[in-house]
Image (spheres, coloured by chain):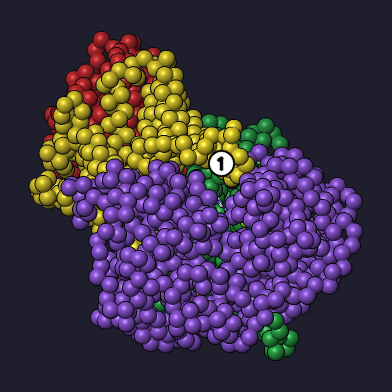
Amino acid sequence: MAQPELSGWAIFKRSIMPPAPDAPVLSLRALSKSFPGVKALQDVQLDLYAGTVTALIGENGAGKSTIVKVLTGIYQPDAGEIFLDGTPVKFPSSEAASAAGVSAIHQETVLFDELTVAENIWLGHAPKTKWGLIDLAAQRSQAAALLESIGAKIDPDILLRELGIAQRHLVAIARALSIDARVVIMDEPTAALSYKEIQELYDLVETLKSKGKAILFISHKFDEIFRIADRYTVFRDGQFVGEGLIREATEGQLVQMMVGRAVDQIFPARVRNIGDVVFTVAGYSHPTEFADIRFSLRKGEILGFYGLVGAGRSEVMQALFGITKPSTGAVNLDGQVRVIRSTSDAIAAGIVYVPEDRGRQGAIKGLPIFQNASLPSLGKTSRAGFLRLAQEFALTREYTQALDLRAASLDQDIGLLSGGNQQKVVIAKWLATRPRVIILDEPTKGIDIGSKAMVHEFMAKLAAEGLAVIMVSSEIPEVLGMSDRVIVMREGRIAAELAGDAMTPEALVRAAAGLGEAA
Amino acid sequence: MSAPHTQNRHLPDRLQTPAMRALRSWEALLVVVFILIFTANSFASPYFLNVWNLSDATFNFTEKAMIAFAMAMLIIAGEIDLSVASIIALASTAMGLVMSAGYGVPVIVVTGIAVGLICGAINGVLVAGMNLPSIVVTIGTMSLFRGVSFIILGDQAFTGYPKEFAFFGQGYVFWVISFELFLFAITAVIFYILLHRTNFGRAVFVIGNNPVGALFSGVRVARVRFILFLLTGLMSGIAAVCLTSRLGSTRPSIATGMELEIITMVVLGGVNILGGSGSILGVVLAAFIMGMVTFGIGLLNVPGIVMSIFLGLLLIAVIAAPKLIWRK
Amino acid sequence: KGAEEAAKELGDVEIIYTGPTDTTAEGQIEVINSLIAQGVNAIAISANDKDALVPALQKAMERGITVISWDSGVAPEGRQMHLNPSSNALIGNTIIKLAADNMPEGGDVAILSASATATNQNIWIEEAKKVLPNYAGINLVDVVYGDDLADKSYREAQGLIAKYPNLKAIIAPTTVGILAASQAVTDGGLIGKVNVTGLGLPSEMAGAVESGATKSFAIWNPIDLGYAATMLSYNIVKGAKAEAGAEIGMGRMGTAKLDDNNEAAMSDPFTYDASNIAEFKSIF
Amino acid sequence: MKAALTSRDALLIYAITAMTAAIAYRFPAFIAPSSLANTFNDTAPLMILVIGQMIVILTKCIDLSVAATLALTGMVAALLDGAGVPLVIVIPTAIALGAVLGMINGLLVWRVGIPSIVVTLGTMTIYRGIIFLMTDGKWVNAHEMSDAFKALPRLHVLGLPVMSWVAIAVIAVFGVIMTRTVLGRSFYAVGGNPHAAVYAGIDVGRTQFAAFTISGALAGLVGYLWVSRYAVAYVDVAGGFELDVVAACVIGGISIAGGIGGVRGAILGCIFLGIIKNALPVIGVSPFWQMAISGTAIVLAVAVNALQNRPKGRLILKPDMQPSAQKVQA
Ligand SMILES: Nc1ncnc2c1ncn2[C@@H]1O[C@H](COP(=O)(O)OP(=O)(O)OP(=O)(O)O)[C@@H](O)[C@H]1O
Ligand SMILES: Nc1ncnc2c1ncn2[C@@H]1O[C@H](COP(=O)(O)OP(=O)(O)OP(=O)(O)O)[C@@H](O)[C@H]1O
Ligand SMILES: [Mg+2]
Ligand SMILES: [Mg+2]
């Protein structure tokens, strides 16, 4: 199994004669996959061509990631066939798929904290010495070469846990490239990356394309789809809706195909009813995470927090919510200084936080919807510490109905809901506490266009009802479309505060990247 | 956006009625197992169906079960306490010390319970306060607590507990209901309410399913964990009072190996060893099942070690059965 | 085995031989409870905790069951009588004498006991300490406990050898201990330098005697012990009074004379050495 | 397996050195080469078992049945020897039987999906029970074993008994397996992130099965060594030893949550525990103190480990004064 020594781009040197453009490298026919209670894929088809980027588009839960997992041997389809160069194949395991030349960057980064970067990249197919042992030196140098080739400055010898989200994602990309693949799948590869890294990724896609790879690109961002994809395939509710060439399609058409109806992408009209200052933060600092954070927030206002991924916005918000303890600084709510030592202090004071990592921090998977929704409000629904289930159901119904939750019953395990619906339960759980200040951290991350519009509408309604809203977001249109004012953070500090006409995309990007004022 | 069907969607509270759910539950399976074992025992030995004998048999499990209730909550919350048997040893030793110093029954009892609480608090500080993994912390305190009673007692024993003290482990409340059985019933009810009917119990389930999510939802995770260890210590202290009274003496080797029997009881009761689910009713049933199995097999004069094979097989079989049946 | 012999001789006796899962007092109590439930006439028990069994055995006596203890005893209030395999004083003296006989010029000896809670061992060690002054030059340097675990006893024996370079003998009044100590001495290449002695069964000790690690050891006949315990139980059930000074028949073993503690000794320990081990090793 | 581990190992080495020095102060003979070799030899079974347990713990499982497996294979080895089977067959049989017992655990974990702690809690009583059923509780004693059977572990080669050499060989082989083979990597991957392991083409259950098999096989090997060394086999051989094995792993920095730890740490943990168990009686610490001392050591080891690995918050602020995360090197 000894591999020839590779360095840098050498793995791509093995040239593949591009097959005739009309013959797909990989195709799926009549593929179905269901989970208990969900038909994730029904009779779908998909074709990938050499040297072509195919975008897979669909709402949340349309089945995009499921098809990626089928193609990489993680899930076995219930029915249907996979053809590689026209011959039917089976991928009983992820090993089999990579042996056949299918490689993927998955939506979640699925790597190992306690292994080094090089070990992460080569796990399962490491270069070996003639004794059959892993060749540590080769593994290291080849990992370094791969990382360099994607413009990532990461030491291959450090443990993965030392890296931030974006760097982890780069390692995942390097891992996908370490397999000599003919088909490269990217499931929302840019979701966790910052501006500069996204540009490098686009370049990488171009290079792969020119090497004749067949690329499947999944994204919710239309600008990038139009920028790099050649073809598109649309799924809706686990079914195939249509495919075609990008240059022959318009954004409106694609959206129409995705959701089955027209969606206006305009942000909701806001009733701006801004009152007095309710919430002030002064001189907030933490030893390693952020320094000198100061801002104030008015009743009915939506304050946007923009920054590149990893700028420390979440850390500030989590400190405000009592998860971590700042070293200095004070919080003032309604003119009173508040000491927030724990999350329960924050909730009691009326400050709530809708976290960015829904799976880990938001939803309590394994417990039913109503127990999730009532959790921070148990003090209200219970009597003398004893549960009253009827009250819990009533409270849950009240707040989930307003968000149009889709579920089988309120007693259903939240883990069985789609991501978007889990997010609705999490938001409902916080609204039920009737907070004064609500912090939403990336509230629409990984949410499809339809649900996104609804979350926006809802935020507008909250502000109109007099809540003070903080919204952390990495999407410029969302920040500009929703906020009354924007704070830009960079490397743990406030880089700029923008309002009114100063809120332009360019100003945001410059402040976030530390480029100073436009010349 | 405005979907036309937005407002009128009605979600039912539940799809399954609680009664239906109960029928399919683990507890139902345990009831069946219990009936089978009870019937088998009645046929196997003529001595089995005798109230006094059955009453005696309850001593096989009452003390363990009282600790098992607290342990069940701890395991549901994703923690474990392997030091319970050692807490019994230390609490019993402390009771012996105050007894030798001439104090009366009330002081002896309070000492036992207080030492249990202190040991629980030590575990709680180490696990909840310092965020250490409970399985290793309690492997350590297991040696530590029993080690301290060895230091105190060495090869000696405390004997000569007052006559009235015998009530806790040998007395009867009325007719065949022993004090221990009575206490078992009371604690079962208290723990049932605590786990299934209070906010605290809800927090236990939340932490067991997702500790990070619990923290982000305003649950005082560390405090709940600490209280759980305190409760386990308390129940071990109470069990120490009963056991010491039943044996009428204290040696450092008292209750050796009991932690594994308690955990077996909890797991057999359907508590997920990985945390997140379980019920007190299940533990009560498991206590009766284990008590009846050991008593029934004991009546056939099967050597103890063979009995332990039965319990081992029972444990694996009962946990495996639903998994194997469900799979298809 | 001895019990079965007695049962056969008596004719109308059924023997239930049983034991707990593990050697804890709690386990023995479960067994006692199940014996009470079966309404047996007599319980003859070798206790692993002198005090902890008392309440359970008292309950048995309340329900009219004859309770005697043998070998490892129960506190007086928990039984009607106790049968020692031999007189404790005699055993204590014997184990010291066995060591002294092989070290005419005196020297250091150490005791490797079973668990620190084993009643009978502790009594013998006490008795041994009492007679020490009678043996000039014999110097008891340490008492360690191997918990009747082979590995622990082995390591404790090794520890003794390392700690006391002048050690002449290890006395282990328990079969596990004497075997482990012999093994440790053999492995340490100290045969002839450190003598291992104490109490053990001939069948198990044959190897150690042959190798020379053990010059001599003592034991009573365990078959006789089972036989005698059964006979005593039978006679008490049939009406013999177990009270101080009483004499109760033990069949072919003669009669047991109860002392003030209602204790009796069966017979004297018998010493085995190279000259007679071959004869006995196939018997018990 | 870089910086954090080395400092943790270093700490253990300091602790072991300090302890040895303290003992040597009271009892100089303890650090004589022969006495140290003796301590090592006494710790050898623990080391071999700990390697197996470490692998199991790395995969997020636990094997409470090691001591019972040891006792059962040891008994079978002794009985086979008694029946006149030659040693060259007895030893492989013991190892194979251990592997089979491990496989039973592994299958229940892998195929049936029962948590390992439940499985091994059950099999631990079952395996011991089987010994009782086989022997009726009787002992196999020294004189019932052949001389060859007893001699092997004591045979001195190059100044050390074979028993020590076996432990050294096992340590060396697994040192290579854990760091340089695909299988070794998969143990870390499966325990570190089972979800991601699936994506990397590693079968989680099968890897755990392999871990249990190895643990069982090593327990089988120790089964023979133990019984021949102490020249006795009975139901309760090595009773409760599984806790020592787990404790040594924990002291050695193997994370009970899986995925973290290595052979070096595990062996240091064994030496630490071995010194406590073997040296305290030698220097005359009352046996009644031993338990409390080893318990305190375990609690301290866990606490120190955790304090060292405490997350310090993310590094976002300009790291002028902070040590750069990128500087950490092999
Ligand atoms: N392991 C699983 N068990 C049960 N249901 C699942 C599982 N994985 C996916 N599903 C369900 O299958 C459907 C398709 O999910 P999938 O992850 O493929 O969506 P997606 O198109 O990738 O959405 P997103 O844009 O949010 O990533 C959803 O309804 C989801 O809840
Ligand atoms: N190296 C890491 N170790 C632990 N947690 C991390 C690490 N990197 C990121 N995270 C967590 O992952 C989540 C996403 O991190 P991200 O990189 O988006 O940074 P962030 O702090 O959220 O910054 P911002 O909100 O400004 O984008 C956060 O909850 C963060 O705490
Ligand atoms: Mg997806
Ligand atoms: Mg963030």
Across and down, in percent, residue A370 comes to: 68, 73
Instruction: In the picture, one chain is purple; tell me its letter.
Output: A
Left or right? Give the position of B62 relative to D69. right
Q: Which amino acid does the dot numbered 1 rest on?
A: Arg
Residue at image x 32%, y 10%? Answer: C137
Secondary structure at badge 1 equals: loop
Instruction: In the picture, one chain is yellow; tell me its letter.
Output: D
Residue at image x 25%, y 10%? Answer: C105
Instruction: In the picture, one chain is green; tell me its letter.
Output: B
In the rendered image, the vertical position of residue C122 relative to residue B65, given as above or below: above
Residue at image x 81%, y 68%? Answer: A463
Residue at image x 30%, y 18%? Answer: D32
Instruction: In the picture, one chain is red; tell me its letter.
Output: C
Across and down, in percent, residue C202 comes to: 21, 37
The residue identified by callout 1 is D310
Quick one: label 1, few (<14), some, or many (20+) residues within 10 Å? Answer: few
